[in-house]
Image (cartoon, coloured by chain):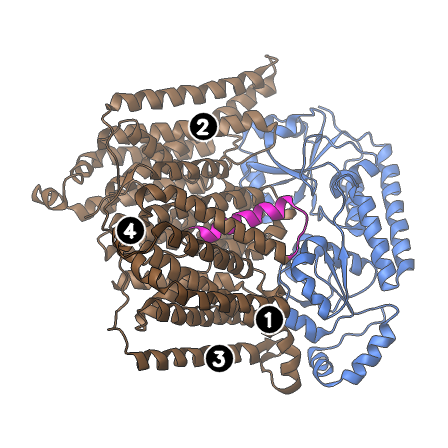
Chain colours: A blue, B brown
Amino acid sequence: MSQGYLNRRILLGAAFAAPFVLSVSRQAFAASPTRIVALDLLATEVLLTLGITPPAIANRALYQRLVAEPELPPTVEDLGPLTEPNAEYLQILRPELIVLSAWQASALGRLSEIAPLHVLQSPARNVPAVSYATDVTRELGNVTGRSTEADQWIERTALALAEAKKALSDRSITPLYICRFAANGRNVAVFGGNGMIGDVLRQVGLTNAWQGRVNASGVVSVGIDQLAGDPDARIVHFDRGAETKQALSRLEQSPLWNALPAVRAKRVTAMPVIYPSGGLFSAARFARQLVSFLPARENHG
Amino acid sequence: MAELAIEPRHRSAGQALYWGGGLLVLSLAVFAINLCGLLTPPGDALRQVMAEDMLLPRLVVSLLSGAGLGLAGVLFQQVLRNPLAEPGTLGVFAGAKCAVVVATLWLPGLLVLGWDVIALAGGGAAMAIVLLIAWRSDFSPLSLILAGLVVSLCLGALGSTLMMVNFDAVNDLYVWEAGSLVQNNWQVAVSLATRFAIVLFLTVLLTRRLELLDLEDAGARGLGVSLVTTRLFAIVVAVAISASVAGFVGLIGFIGLAGPAIARQAGARRLRDRLWAGPLIAAALLTITDQTLFLLSDGMEIPAGAVCAFLAAPMLLWLLRSFKGDQHETVSLATAERSPLTYPAVLSRLALSFVLLLAVAAVALTLGRTPDGWHLAVGSDFTELLHWRLPRVGAAAAAGLMFALAGVIMQKLTGNALASPELLGVSSGAGLLLVVASFFLPAVDRGTMMLLSCAGAFTALVILLWLGRRTAFRSEHLLLSGVALGSIMAAMLTYLTSLGDPRILRVLAWLSGSISSVTLRETVLMSLGALVALCLVPLTARWLLILPLGGAVSGSLGVPERHSRVALLSLTAALTGTATIVVGPLSFVGLMAPHLARMSGFRTPVVQTFAAGILGAILMVSADWIGRTIAFPWQVPAGLVSTILGGAFFAALLVRR
């Protein structure tokens, strides 16, 4: 990380008063831009993974809540909602590149007047999430002149997944339901398909107990009875703090919950939230969490 | 006192019993299929538990929710003498939603009280506002529905924006809002049954007094019945049960309308009959829907609430066909009418409002916020920022002008002071097509979206025409069709959002208006379009002057009614469709601007049109400016700001009456 933090005053000054300086700096950075703004969560994650600190991102709070890691430096400014980041503010910040997702591109096309846009295409229907994240990382690595870092991370993730696979292989892990409970204790979001959660499970050699339908981001809302489909399965759920606590206290009063094979055999694991549409960093983190949170020996009962 | 009532059918209440019984048997039959499916192969202990603690409580909860909402519907309808009253149309659900969103975001400590308590507080508050607004017009059916509509739209918009901005913090709310009936124990069923029993008991106590409400007010008072207390008490009871359902289960719209309406059609005319038939039919309908979804969905949870609203809204349209209303009832607003201005006064005032528009635009172009605080852009800053601000100020002005013109035309066309593209569902029609397009088509540019939007607005207008042709486009029909169209859009959006599909973000981006992304070229084109429309209006001046007088008069004065209507409606569709793309389907500018113009003394159609156009532009530019400075760097969509401002304005007009 070689880029220093510019405070707002300097930026404002630079923005309004020094076209000469700017033109020089533009040329200097022309080969590999470093002032890169991310308007989407995945883009932010990948940039931070590559060691680039964006001067600003859209919806800081959402990133911190959902993605959390890689950690967001406090210097990164907030541009407002993902659907409508503040263009005037963005102009003041003078980014050299703006990275955004395909769903934003049609509405935010005008931002190209501030800096070139780099649009991350949505994954095609059949592309598994990890290979999509790999492509995105490589793509952004090329664009930002950090191909080396990108390749390192791709390798590191593959390694992390392989290590996790190895560590899990001698544990005879049963199929897993990966899910998130709604605070009402009635609805459950189950992850699967080609989404990031489902794909990582496959890559580390585990079986996803949920074989049903999922939407384009690899998630579906069901009732808890669906967690009984595979009687040998373990339930892994993402702990969102207060909401999850509330959900569990309600579930404990449910005869159906207590009758689920996984619950009866105490095969229920909580782990920190992973952003289910995240990039390689999230994928590797999820794999590592599986290794450290899943039991060394499976209790069958 | 005017009363909207369904034409009496001379059938006995016994027929309602057949209907209710038949539907109930049908719902139990679907349940039986599900139960058999669950219990094969027999002997599995877990499947036994599922039947006992999942499927059975789900059945009971859906029956109780449906019955509760049906009962609330009957009570509301009796007390308010309005066959269209139900928790959804009266703003109870929108209030509950807003309260729950606010509690989740800022006062999570309150959530331990239970969602039903919060929903009750919110729903009760919304209902109180609605009643307060309708008070001045003696709770006349139309003014009540209008007040409910406006409050629902405002609170609904507020709640949705809060949810949209905090997209993931309120993940659970999306599922709640969609009204999922999934259960895994008896808790909800038991709590709901307790509430329902209490409410039922209170209703039985109230029945005799409520029956007296069928008499004219004076007659009932003569019998010593305190009408106000009875009404108020019944409303509290109805709000309580609908908020309980909302809190425990979720938002289930239109069931409270459908049950009692079918009961009425099936011959349950007397209150006593409606009190059992309405809830019975509502319960059966909700259960049939939910059990069928359970049967078909293969494990995936499809929330019944949104589906019900989707199915029931067309039913509302169908019911509208048989409404008999007071021909003369219109809601007049406190427009504090001045005497018409003299010609020079008109000119000077028009000039004055134009200067005001320029002043507002100048502020919007120069004054803004930067990370360091307020900032007046001059010199080079100004040229830098003009690049961003000019297109949006221009687009806001054009959109405001377009909505205002559409509003004037529609008000003249229907002869009703309340008509506006927002309230009549024309912009909802445009929004509906946008939702479908952005969900199922690949990303398209704004030009295509604009065409789609106009097509949607036009389709909505054609539907309105088709539905309204039998009643010579009477205002109530148009208005209520608007309610139905708006609900179809809302239900569709709720359902799509609850799926958590990433494409919904694109939909939300379109629906919140794309004012920030309008290019200068598009702004210029839009402004030209707005000006052309402004110039077309004088050509239609004769129509606008004569049409409000009614079909017979205009015919005898030589205005070809159908042709003039079609021409004006096409113009309205184009205006609404274009403006919807920029600021989203809700704004209330189309309602506000024409009234402000009238209140300022601009009365003749052409003058009112010009004045409303300028005022609409002022309103929209101000709303956009407030939206982008109030929470810097976050931006509140201009459509939302003006919806809230417009709602408050409209409520004030109704109250001051």
Q: Chain of mark 4?
A: B
From the image, state whether disc 4 or disc 3 is nearer to you: 4
- Please report whichever mark, 2 or 4, sits nearer to the chain's N-terminal start: 2
Asked whether the residues under the numbered discs 2 and 4 touch, taking CB atoms below 8 Å apart as contact, a structural biologist would say no
- Please report whichever mark, 3 or 1, sits nearer to the chain's N-terminal start: 3
Label 3 crowd bin: few (<14), some (14–19), many (20+), radius 10 Å? some
Q: Chain of mark 3?
A: B
- Please report whichever mark, 1 or 2, sits nearer to the chain's N-terminal start: 2
From the image, state whether disc 1 or disc 4 is nearer to you: 4
Using the image as rendered, state which of residue A146 and residue A267 is in the foreground: A146
Q: Residue lying furthest top in this view?
A: B42
Residue at 65% x, 66% y: name it.
A79
- Please report whichever mark, 2 or 3, sits nearer to the chain's N-terminal start: 2
From the image, state whether disc 2 or disc 4 is nearer to you: 4
Q: Secondary structure at mark 2?
A: helix
Residue at 53% x, 53% y: name it.
B454
The residue where tag 2 is placed is B287
- Please report whichever mark, 1 or 4, sits nearer to the chain's N-terminal start: 1
Which region of the structure is painted magenta? B425-445
Separation of disc 1 and disc 4 at Cα?
Answer: 42 Å
Using the image as rendered, state which of residue B527 and residue A141 is in the foreground: B527
Q: Secondary structure at mark 4?
A: helix
Identify the amino acid type marked 3: Leu
Residue B431 included in the magenta stretch of the image: yes
Q: Which mark is residue B551?
A: 4
Residue at 44% x, 42% y: name it.
B247
Identify the amino acid type marked 1: Pro
Identify the amino acid type marked 2: Thr
The residue where tag 1 is placed is B391
Q: Which mark is residue B358?
A: 3
